[in-house]
C-alpha cells in the first residue's frame, strides 16, 4: 500500500524570552570581537550581531562588495617565455624558473591585486538601561535568527534579527515587557590605524545620515572604475515604532516609549553613479511591516533547506544545553559528541547562510575588517572546494548554482588566462580570485601561474552535480561544455617524454615544496596528474551519456593511456611529485596528492592495494605533523586528510581528524576558524559536515556503502536526509550496536549494490557484505541488517 501525505509548514511557535533553540546555540556573554559574533545571512546580505544589550553593533555586508583596485591593461605574457621555463625546470633549476613570471610582472607593468571583500557598514543601537541581571544571546539555525535577550530592573527585552531569503531584507525586531527607548544610526565600519592608507586610496566618499522620522541611509563611492565592477553601494533602513514616537537628531533616529520596534534594511551595489535610494525607499515601503510574516516566508525557504539533514550521536541532553563557550571548553581535550553534533549543524547553517549570489568566499559572507586575510577571496586550490563540499551530499544541490554561475561568469577571463599564460585553448582557473578570473596572486615563492589544476577540479563539481541529481539538461547545457573546455587545455598543454608518457611542465603541488628543493615550482605534481585523469574520465562518461563526440572520446582515451602512473617512495608513501630526485615533504598543511581520494575514489586506488597503503602512509605522516600542533594551521587540510581516510576505511584516523576539527576551530558564535582558535574562515563549515557524511555513507552511481569508516566509539547514532549519487535520498541510516537500519528512496528507478563494512546476516544461513537491490521510483525501500555472529 502506498500512502500519500501532504506536508505543510507547521505553525511557527511564538518565541519566548531566553528560549533555548533545539538546533542552534546559546551563549552567556556578548561577542568579545567581531570574529565571535552571531551570524545570519541569506546568501546575498549578511549580518554579524555582537550581542551587546545596551550598546549594540551589528556589522552588515553584501556578497558583491569587493573594493575595486587598480588594474593593468593585460595579464603577463607567460606563454612567450614558456619554453624557457620548461627548459629550466627540466634542468632542475626550479628557483630560476619561478623567477621568470616575477620578472615579466615588472617588465610588463602588471601590478594587479585581487579586489578585496569589505564590510558594508555598522548598525549601531543604543538602549536606555540599567545593570543586567540576566543575559543570553543565541542563534536558531532552523529560523536563521540571531537573538539577544536581557533583563534589567525595567523588564525583559529581546532583539531578534534575520536576513530574509524570501524578501531579500534584513529584519530586526525589538520587544520587551516594558516600553522601548533606544536609538539607531548607520556608521562606517571601524577603521584600524594601519588601514587608513588603504581606505583613503580606494574609497572616495562616505555618507551616513537620517531622514524624517523613518529612514536611515548610507552611501559609499569607490575610487577606481572598471567594466563590470561596482562603483559603490548604498544602504537604506526603514524604522517602524509601534505606539511610540521617532525623532531625528543628526544622523540618529531616536525611539521613545514604543511597544515594539521593527527595522528593515536593504543594501545594493551600484554599477554607475546613479543613486538607488528612491528605488530602495519604494521597495522598503512595499515590504510588509510584520516581523512574524517576514520570518514565516523566510523559514519556508531557509528552514526547509536546513531541516533536510539531521545527524545525531545520541549526545547527552546536559551537554547539548551547554552554552557554546562551555561546550568548546569541555571539548578542548577531546570533542564530546554534543560538540560534534553542534559543529555539524553550525557548519551547514553557515554555508546555507553564505551561499546565494556567490559561493562562500573565505569569509563566507561576513567580515568585520577592511583588510580580510587573503582579501576574503575565492581560493580554488582547496578552500572553496572544502566550503562547498557538503552541498551535494547534504541534499542542497540548488546551492551549487551559485558556484557554477560564479565560474561561468568568468569564462572569458579563464580563456584569456589559458592563452596568455600557456598559449592553450580552453580555460585556466587561478588559485586565487574575487571579481576576475585572471591570475593576480603569484611570486617567486608562490609560483601560482604554474598551477594548472584549477579548471579540472572545478569541472569535477559540475560533473558531480549531474551524478547527484541526474539532471541531463544541466549536463548537456552547462556541465559538459565546461568540462570540455577544461579538457581542451590539456590537449594543448601536455608534452610527451622519451617513454611516450605525458609531462606536466610546469607543475605545482599547492603551496608545498619538495623536501630537497627551496622552490614550489616542479614537474609532475601528483595532484595535477590526478585532476587531469579524473577530468578525462568524466568527459568520456558524460559524452557517452549524451551520445556525442565519438572522436573526442577516442582522443581522451588515448590521452588517458599516456598519463604517468602514480608512484611510491622508498618508505612506501604515495609520492607528491612523480619526478626523479624530488623528495617528500610531509610536514605541510596541504595534502594535495591525496586528491584522488577527496571525492570519488579513483579507479587506481580501488584496484591497487599498494596505492591504498601508500596513501594511508601519507595520512599517518601528515597526522604526526598535525598532532604536534593539535591540528595546526589551515583546517581544510584536516578535511583533506579526513576525507581520504574515510574513503580508505580508516575510521580511527578519520575520528581523530573530526575531533580536532570539532573541538578547536570554532568561534564562540560558532563561525569556523582557519587555525586553532584563530582567523575567521568558512572552509570547514562545509568541510567538517562533509567528512562526517563520508564516514557514514559513500556513494557512486550504482553503489551505496554504509558505515565505511564508523569509529568504534560511535556505538549508536543516525543521519537522515542525505543525497546520494544516482539521485537517491538516504531517508534514514541508523545504527545501534550490531544492528543497522537503512531507508533509501530513489528519484529514478535503478539497481544498486548495498555494501556493508562487515558481514551481515542475509536471512539464510550464509552471510554477505553486499546486497543487490532494485529500487523503485519515489518509494521508500528499507532494510534492517544485523552483524553476523562470528
Image: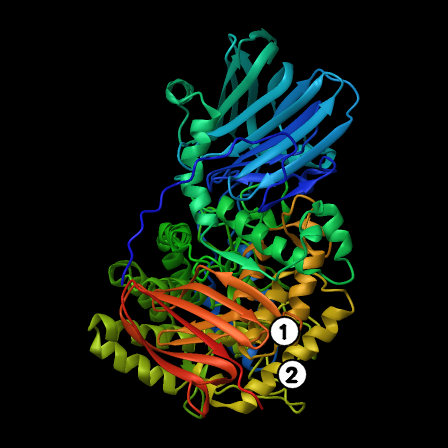
Instruction: Name the residue located 48 percent from the left edge and 26 percent from the top edge.
Output: 291
Image quadrant holding the C terminus, namely: bottom right
Residue under label 1? 711
Image coordinates of residue 392 in percent, x first then y, are 43, 60
Q: Nearer the viewer, mark 2 or mark 1?
A: 1
Do the CB atoms of the residues marked 2 and 1 lie less than 8 Å apart? no
User: Quadrant of the rendered structure where residue 789 is?
Assistant: bottom right
Q: Residue furthest front?
A: 1
Q: Secondary structure at mark 1?
A: loop
Tell me where residue 688 appears, x and y as whole percent: 58, 60
Mark 1 Cα-neighbour bin, 10 Å: few <14, some 14–19, many ≥20:
some
Is there any visible trace of residue 639 in the rendered image?
yes
Image coords of residue 559 (percent x, y): 35, 82
Number of numbered labels in the structure image: 2
**In this picture, is 162 found above or below 676?**
above
* Residue closest to the eye, 514 or 497: 514
Within 10 Å of disc 2 (Cα), the crowding (few <14, some 14-19, many 20+) is some
Residue 47 figure quarter: top right
Q: Quadrant of residue 150?
A: top right
Percent x, y of residue 745: 35, 65
Q: Residue at x 57, y 77 (%)?
A: 738
Picture quarter with the N terminus: bottom left
Whether residue 574 is visible = no
Whether residue 514 is situated above or below residue 237 in the rendered picture:
below
Return the mark for residue 617: 2
What numbered label is drawn on residue 71? none
Cα separation between marks 2 and 1: 19 Å
Q: Nearer the viewer, residue 420 or 149?
A: 149
Q: Is residue 164 left or right of residue 19?
A: left
Amino acid at each position: 500500500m502506498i500512502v500519500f501525505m501532504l506536508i505543510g509548514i507547521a505553525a511557527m511557535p511564538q518565541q519566548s524570552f531566553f528560549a533555548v533553540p533545539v538546533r542552534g546555540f546559546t551563549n552567556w556573554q556578548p561577542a568579545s570581537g567581531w570574529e565571535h559574533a552571531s551570524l545570519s545571512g541569506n546568501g546575498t546580505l549578511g549580518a554579524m550581531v555582537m550581542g551587546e544589550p545596551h550598546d549594540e553593533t551589528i556589522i552588515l555586508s553584501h556578497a558583491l562588495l569587493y573594493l575595486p583596485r587598480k588594474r593593468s591593461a593585460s595579464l603577463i605574457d607567460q606563454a612567450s617565455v614558456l619554453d624557457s621555463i620548461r627548459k629550466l625546470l627540466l634542468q632542475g633549476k626550479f628557483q630560476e624558473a619561478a623567477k621568470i613570471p616575477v620578472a615579466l610582472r615588472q617588465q610588463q607593468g602588471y601590478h594587479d591585486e585581487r579586489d578585496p571583500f569589505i564590510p558594508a557598514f555598522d548598525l549601531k543601537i543604543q538602549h536606555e538601561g540599567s545593570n543586567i541581571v540576566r543575559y543570553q544571546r543565541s542563534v536558531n539555525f532552523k529560523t536563521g535568527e540571531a537573538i539577544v535577550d536581557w533583563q534589567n530592573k525595567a523588564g525583559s527585552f529581546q532583539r531578534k534579527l534575520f536576513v530574509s531569503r524570501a524578501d531579500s531584507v534584513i529584519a530586526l525586531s525589538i520587544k520587551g515587557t516594558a516600553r522601548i527607548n533606544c536609538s539607531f544610526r548607520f556608521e562606517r565600519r571601524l577603521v584600524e590605524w594601519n588601514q587608513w592608507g588603504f581606505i583613503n586610496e580606494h574609497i572616495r566618499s562616505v555618507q551616513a545620515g537620517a531622514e524624517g522620522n523613518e529612514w536611515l541611509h548610507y552611501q559609499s563611492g569607490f575610487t577606481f572604475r572598471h567594466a563590470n565592477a561596482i562603483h559603490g553601494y548604498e544602504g537604506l533602513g526603514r524604522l517602524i515604532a509601534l505606539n511610540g514616537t521617532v525623532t531625528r537628531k543628526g544622523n540618529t533616529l531616536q525611539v521613545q516609549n514604543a511597544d515594539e520596534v521593527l527595522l528593515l534594511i536593504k543594501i545594493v551595489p551600484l554599477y554607475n553613479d546613479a543613486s538607488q535610494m528612491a528605488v530602495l525607499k519604494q521597495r522598503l515601503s512595499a515590504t510588509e511591516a510584520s516581523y512574524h510574516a517576514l520570518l514565516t516566508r523566510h523559514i519556508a525557504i531557509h528552514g526547509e533547506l536546513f531541516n533536510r539533514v539531521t545527524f545525531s550521536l545520541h549526545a547527552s541532553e546536559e551537554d547539548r544545553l551547554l552554552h557554546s563557550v562551555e561546550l568548546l571548553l569541555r571539548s578542548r581535550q577531546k570533542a564530546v559528541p554534543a560538540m560534534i553534533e553542534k559543529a555539524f549543524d553550525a557548519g551547514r547553517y553557515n554555508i546555507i547562510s553564505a551561499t546565494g549570489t556567490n559561493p562562500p568566499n573565505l569569509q563566507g559572507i561576513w567580515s568585520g575588517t577592511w583588510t580580510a586575510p587573503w582579501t576574503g577571496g575565492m581560493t580554488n586550490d582547496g578552500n572553496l572546494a572544502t566550503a562547498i563540499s557538503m552541498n551535494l551530499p547534504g541534499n542542497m544541490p540548488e546551492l551549487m548554482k551559485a558556484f557554477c554561475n560564479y565560474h561561468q561568469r568568468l569564462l572569458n577571463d579563464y580563456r584569456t588566462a589559458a592563452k596568455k599564460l600557456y598559449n592553450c585553448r580552453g580555460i585556466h582557473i587561478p588559485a586565487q580570485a574575487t571579481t576576475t578570473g585572471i591570475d593576480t596572486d603569484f611570486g617567486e615563492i608562490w609560483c601560482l601561474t604554474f598551477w594548472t589544476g584549477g579548471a579540472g577540479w572545478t569541472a569535477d563539481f559540475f560533473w558531480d552535480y549531474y551524478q547527484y541529481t541526474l539532471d541531463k539538461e544541466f549536463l548537456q547545457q552547462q556541465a559538459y561544455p565546461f568540462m570540455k573546455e577544461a579538457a581542451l587545455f590539456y590537449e594543448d598543454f601536455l608534452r610527451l617524454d622519451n617513454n611516450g608518457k605525458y609531462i606536466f611542465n610546469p607543475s605545482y603541488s599547492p603551496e608545498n615544496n619538495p623536501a630537497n628543493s627551496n622552490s614550489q615550482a616542479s614537474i609532475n605534481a601528483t595532484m595535477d596528474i590526478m585532476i587531469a585523469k579524473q577530468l578525462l574520465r568524466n568527459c568520456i562518461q558524460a559524452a557517452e551519456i549524451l551520445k556525442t563526440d565519438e572522436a573526442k572520446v577516442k582522443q581522451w582515451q588515448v590521452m588517458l593511456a599516456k598519463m604517468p602512473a602514480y608512484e611510491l617512495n622508498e618508505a612506501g608513501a604515495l609520492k607528491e611529485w612523480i619526478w626523479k630526485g624530488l623528495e617528500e615533504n610531509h610536514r605541510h598543511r596541504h595534502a594535495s596528492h591525496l586528491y584522488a581520494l577527496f571525492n570519488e575514489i579513483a579507479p587506481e586506488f580501488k584496484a591497487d592495494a599498494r596505492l591504498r597503503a601508500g596513501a594511508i602512509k601519507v595520512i599517518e605522516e601528515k597526522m604526526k605533523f598535525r598532532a604536534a600542533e593539535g591540528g595546526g594551521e589551515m583546517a581544510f587540510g584536516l578535511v583533506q586528510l579526513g576525507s581520504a581516510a574515510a574513503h580508505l576505511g580508516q575510521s580511527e584516523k578519520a575520528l581523530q581528524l573530526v575531533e580536532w576539527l570539532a573541538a578547536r576551530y570554532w568561534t564562540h558564535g560558532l563561525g569556523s576558524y582557519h587555525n586553532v582558535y584563530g582567523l575567521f574562515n568558512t572552509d570547514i563549515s562545509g568541510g567538517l559536515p562533509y567528512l562526517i557524511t563520508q564516514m557514514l555513507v559513500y556513494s557512486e552511481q550504482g553503489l551505496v556503502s554504509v558505515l565505511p569508516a564508523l569509529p568504534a566509539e560511535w556505538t549508536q547514532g543516525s543521519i537522515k536526509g542525505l543525497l546520494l549519487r544516482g539521485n537517491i535520498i538516504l531517508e534514514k541510516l541508523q545504527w545501534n550496536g550490531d544492528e543497522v537500519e537503512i531507508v533509501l528512496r530513489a528519484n529514478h528507478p535503478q539497481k544498486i549494490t548495498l555494501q556493508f563494512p562487515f558481514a551481515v546476516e542475509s536471512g539464510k544461513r550464509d552471510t554477505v557484505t553486499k546486497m543487490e537491490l532494485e529500487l523503485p521510483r519515489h518509494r521508500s525501500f528499507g532494510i534492517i541488517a544485523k552483524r553476523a555472529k562470528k
